[in-house]
Image (tube, rainbow, N blue to C red):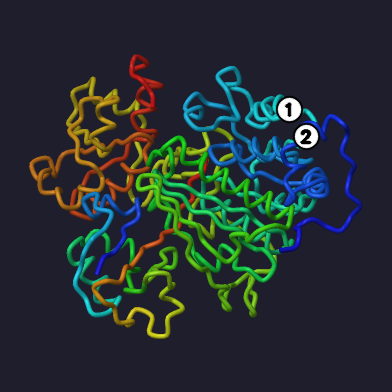
Amino acid sequence: MNINVPTPLRSYTGGQQTVSVPGATVGEALESLTGAYPELRQHLYSAEGKLRSFVNLYLNDDDIRYLPLKEATPVEDSDELSIIPSIAGGY
Amino acid sequence: MPTALPETELPKLSHDEISRYSRHLILPEVGMEGQQKLKAAKVLCVGTGGLGAPLALYLAAAGVGTIGLVDFDTVDASNLQRQIIHSTATVGKLKVDSAEIMLKGLNPNTNIIKHNTMLTSANALEIFKDYDIIADGTDNFQTRYLVNDACVLLGKPNAYGSIFRFEGQASVFAAKDAPCYRCLYPDPPPPGLVPSCAEGGVLGILPGLVGVIQATEVIKLILGIGESLAGRLLLVDALTMKFRTLKLHKNPECPICGTNRTITELIDYDQFCGIQKPTSAGPLEVAQNPVLSEAPMVDGIPQISVQELKRRLDAHEDVFVLDVREQHEVQIVNIGAPLIPLGQLASRVGELEAVKNHRIVVHCKLGGRSQKAAVILKQAGFPNVENLTGGILAWADKIDPTLPKY
C-alpha cells in the first residue's frame, strides 16, 4: 500500500512524498515503513511503542482511532494511509 | 447554518457603505442583511503574521465592522516575503500599528482594536470575550492550545489555519457540537520536533492561501451560509495543488469538550507543551523557543555564545565546528564549517569518528536544530559537544556583520 508522508517527516524518507510498503494491516504497513526508515520511528511512536497523539493516521478518509480494529485494520494494496501531523506555523 | 452573531438589531449602512459593498449587496447570499451582519461582527485575529495578514485584510475589505488584532512583535524585513499587511515603510514598527495603517487605508470604516500583547492564560478570556469569532493565525503550539481552550470555554468558534513549508491545514474548531483542536490533537509534539517557519522555511504565498481560507470561513460563519469546515480538516498541498478534506470526530474523552471534562479553566500552556516560559521581547521565534535563549545548559548540552566560539578560534584552541543546516542554506551564508544536515546526522555519525574526542561546537541558523544534533552526538558517545547559541545569525550579528542574514 502507499503511505503519504507529510512535509515535516519527509527529511526522514529521503524526501519521498509517497512510500510504497508491504503489509496486511495498518500496523504491519507502518512497521514496514519504520523498518525502511528507522529515524521515522521516534516521530510516530513513543518510547513505549504507542502511536503518538500529535500524529493522526487516516486510512483513506477514516481516522484509524475510530476504526473498530484500529491499527489491526486489514489493508489492500489500493488503500492509502496518510500521516497527518500537527503543524503550528502561521507567522 | 445559523449565524455566529448574537441576536441584536443590525446597524444601518451609510450611502458610502452601500456603494463600497455593492458587489456583496447584489449577491443574494449576502444582500443588505448579510452586509449589516458583517458590519455588526467582531472578529479577533490572533497574530498579524503570514496567516493574519491576508485574513485581516480581506475581513476589513469585506466590511467586518470590528477587527481585533493581537500581536506583540515588531515588523522585520524577513516578514515581508509573506506578511502583506505590513510594508517596507513600517519595518521596525509594532505589528498592530503597522497592520492598522494598512487596514485603515483599505477600509477606513473598520473599527480596529489593537491588543499589543502576548496572548496568555491570564488575558485570553478577557480579550476574547468581546468578539464573536476568533481566527487563530499564530505560530506555536502553546498559543494554539490556549486559543482552542479559551474558545471552548467561551463557546466561540475558532477559524483555524496552520502551515508548514508547502502544506497547510484549516478547520473551524469549537463551533457548537463540533470537535475542538484537542479532539484532533490531544497532545502537542515535544518541543523542537516540528520546526518553526523560521527554521523550516515557508513558501510565501502559502499563508496567503490558508489565511484567505480562514477569512472565507469567518465570513460564512457571520453570514450563516454554506457549510463550514467545522467537523472537517482541510489539507492543502501547494506543490501538488491538491486539496483534501478529512472528517473529524468529536472525541468523547476530550479533556475540554468531552463528557468528563478535566480542564475547566485555562492552564499553563508552556508547561503543557513542555517548554520554559517564553520572554515577551525579541523576535517571536526566539521568544518561543527556549533552546534559542540564554540558558547555560539545555538537556545536558552546554550552550556557548558566538563570542566564546570566536575567542576559541582566535586562540587556536582545539575546537571542531559542525554545521547541521541544509545544503541550500550553506549556499546563502556559511562560516566554513563542514556540513552534515540534521536529518542525516544519525546515519552519518561515523564520519565524525576522527574528531570524536575533540571539543565539538554544533551550529545551525538559530540554535534549535544544532541543539537536537548535539543531543544526537552526545547519545552516540561524543563526550564534549556544545551548542552555538543563536546560530549563524548571532555570528552575523555580533562577530561578522559582513555576512548576510536570512
Q: Out of B17 and B327, give the one closest to the viewer.
A: B17
Q: Out of A79 and B263, give the one closest to the viewer.
A: A79
Residue for point 63% across, 30% down: B95
Pointer 1 chain: B
Q: Residues within 10 Å of mark 1 (few under 14, many from 20)?
A: some
Give coordinates of residue B174: x percent, y percent: 65, 63
Q: Which residue is mark 2?
A: B110
Amino acid at circle 2: Thr
Where disc 2 sits, the SS reads loop
Give coordinates of residue B109: x percent, y percent: 80, 32
Q: Are marks 2 and 1 in contact (CB under 8 Å)?
A: yes
Specify the quadrant of the image occupied by residue B254. bottom right
- Specify which label sits upstream in the sequence, 2 or 1: 1
Q: Residues within 10 Å of mark 2 (few under 14, many from 20)?
A: many
Task: Kindly identify which numbered label has been placed on residue B156.
Answer: none
Q: Spot the residue most to the top.
A: B402
Give coordinates of residue B229: x percent, y percent: 59, 60
Q: Which residue is mark 1?
A: B104
Pick the quarter of the image with the C terminus of chain B: top left
Q: Spot the residue most to the left.
A: B354
Residue for point 87% across, 38% down: B13
Amino acid at circle 1: Lys
Give coordinates of residue B372: x percent, y percent: 31, 48
Specify the quadrant of the image occupied by residue B106. top right
- Compared to residue A57, the image places residue B296 above or below, namely above
